[in-house]
Image (spheres, rainbow, N blue to C red):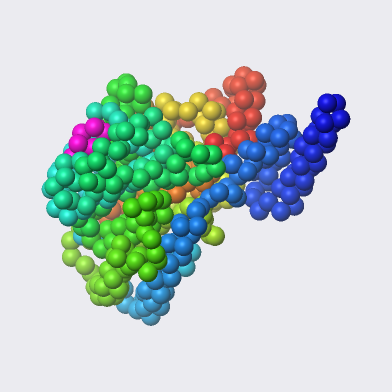
Amino acid sequence: MEITWNIFSYLITSLQILFILFILFFERKDAGRKFSWMFIIYFLPGVGIFLYFMLSGHFFTKTRKMDNIQKYIYSRTTPYVMEQEQYFEKIKSKIKNKTLIEYSDIVKMNFNNAISNIAYTETISEFTNGKDMFKSLIEDLESAEKSIFMEFFIFREDDIGKQIMDILCRKAENGVDVKLLYDDFGSLLTRRFFFRKLDNAGGSSIPFFPIRIGPPLTVNFRNHRKNVIIDEKIGYIGGINIGDEYIIGLGKNPDKPWRDTHLRMTGSCVAAMLITFMIDYYSCAYGKKSIKSLKKTETYFPLEKIESLNNEISDNLMNDVPGDDIIPVQLLLSSPNDNHKHQIRDCMIRMIMNAKESIYIETPYFTPDEAFFSALKLASMAGRKVYVIVPRDWDKSYVKAAAFQFIREIMEYGVKFYAYPGFIHSKMLIIDDKLITIGTTNIDTRSFELHFEMNMVFYDEGFAKYNSSIFKKDLEKSEEMELAWFNSRFILQRTVWSFCKLFSPIM
């Protein structure tokens, strides 16, 4: 028995050394993340290696079906994006949209790095709370005639969840094509029976990377996207999931109001949102719901819209498109299964580096990676006004502890932080009141590397200024956080912050 234990102990120690050496010499992450994993593996023998397999972001990030579908769709859409890029460069000097010209380097980067074409909104409505968003969404769902496609990180079996599910089931019974993709981990507290009601009504519900059955190898890679497409004409994107807390408040507490940002759009941008949904949905579909052959893929993906979209965009680029809501946009996606998985983060960093006067950020979490942290620090040191609004009431105490250490460190370089009274779940970045991105991406490593996210970049000064006014109203409600307060905390509390920061890459 003792010999067996010694052999086992020797094997674990050898594996520890091998993994630590691998991380030290071959891990292509920042030094902080390397140290975190080496720390975990060293002090948690065996368990640390298991956690590295599960949570590092190198393993189990995709299925073969997901890889095949994604490659196929990208092979069909990439030529159109490249064609548009060439046309954009050719006529750039004649384009009348000043924002597109001023930030043409960002446009080009998103062409190449994110394989994202320029599309347009025809109308756009913005919601800063769940009550107004759900009212609009329910009206659109009730009016749906052909199709309803939805994907959410969280879909709760509460009052608003039941109300929306009842509509989906009724629409499916009446012949509307209803497809629902929900994240299995984010919706873990929602019974499978609740989703099966839609299947029984003639619709289709699918869990993203299911963890309730079988080994949870994909537990760390979640679909954080909020994406709704109705009749292929109306699209919803932003931070709001399906749950009562988005109406009532954090923990359903009206004293902790939930502040969010969500958008309703029409226009050619909806086609890109539709393709995103179809990739996500059919990557996880199984049984009768799956695509049996890639030859049938074209039946399910609106690829023909990309070609007509290009012709429309080519015309619009040359002209001042009438109407305040007509805005050129690029839809950005990021996920751990992409070779270049930092498309959204890279665009944000480029926006920050392009800023000449101001950088406004709203985020529910602030545990950035080294690249994003450095970009904000350098921008502030260069004299840019960097204002970040975070929650006063956080939903996760350990994330708050890690964020406080990041906040304390970067405030020393002049970045200003404000605590919103309640829980701010908005994900927004504005530079110089000219360029803005809104979507599902938090300022944390998990969103940057481990989650499936989507953001929209809006090239319109008017829309950016409108959101700057919203930001400034939020600023007036918020309390400025003082560096002196952070530095005056008891040393044990600051030690806890620093300790939690070590684990921020996997929070």
Residue at figure coordinates x 32%, y 23% from the top left: 252
Image coordinates for residue 95, horizontal then vertical, percent: 31, 73
Q: Which residues are magenta?
A: 160-167
Residue 23 left/right relative to 2? left
- 186 up-or-down from 69: above or below: above
Query: Can residue 108 be seen here?
Result: no
Quarter of the image with the N terminus is: top right
Q: Quadrant of residue 422?
A: top left
Residue 503 lies in the magenta-colored region? no
Image coordinates for residue 209, horizontal then vertical, percent: 45, 45
Query: Can residue 29 be seen here?
Result: yes
- 32 up-or-down from 62: above or below: above
Residue 59 left/right relative to 6? left
Q: Quadrant of residue 190?
A: top left
| Dominant secondary structure (helix, strand or loop) of the stretch shown in magenta | helix
Front position in the image: 451 or 366: 451
Front position in the image: 253 or 177: 177
